[in-house]
Amino acid sequence: MSVGTGIFLAGALLAVVALYIATKDRWNWMKTILWPLGVTLTMVTGFYLHSLIPEKPKVEKTFWEIPLGASQTDVLFIRGKPSTKESDRWVYSSNTMVEAGITVTMLDSWTERCSSSFLPAV
């Protein structure tokens, strides 16, 4: 700390002491001190609790290696020919995904319940 900073901080402390002496019977100093202390403590606690969240939400840009907003031809190029093509959706079974060389990691409960994946036709 330099000499100038020390003089400034000493002057600020003397100013607060003089203000307290002049207004101790007119102001509620307990509220004046506890309010900023409480707000600061609340903010620090909030930031700390926010840092404890393990996985924060993130923007999804792809779905099964297909970029969002891809055209039908792009999906056909990336995923290959669908196993079943209906009027409003394409159905890819797990066999066609393996043939196309696409690796999809799913939870065991999903693989037990779902035998195919659905992509809407655009």
Image: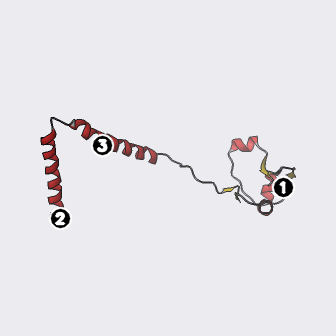
Name the quarter where the N terminus is drawn: bottom left
Disc 2 marks a residue whose amino acid type is: Ser
In terms of secondary structure, where does tag 2 sit? loop
Please name the residue that numbered disc 2 is placed on.
2
Q: What residue type is labelled 1?
A: Pro
Dot 3, crowdedness within 10 Å: few (<14), some or many (≥20)? few
Q: How many labels sit on residues? A: 3
First in sequence, mark 2 or 1: give its number: 2
Residue annotated with mark 3: 36
Q: What residue is drawn where x is 13% and y is 42%?
A: 22
Instruction: Identify the residue under disc 1.
Output: 82
Q: Nearer the viewer, mark 2 or mark 3?
A: 3
Closer-to-camera residue (40/24): 24
Q: In this view, does 65 lie above or below 15?
A: below
66 left or right, relative to 25: right
- Residue 19 is situated, as x and y percent measured from the top left of the image, at 15, 45
- SS of the residue at dot 1? loop
Q: Is mark 3 on a helix, strand or loop?
A: helix
Residue nearest the observer in this picture, 33 or 20? 20
Q: Characterize the local packing of mark 2: few (<14), some (14-19) or many (20 or more) Cα atoms within 10 angstroms.
A: few
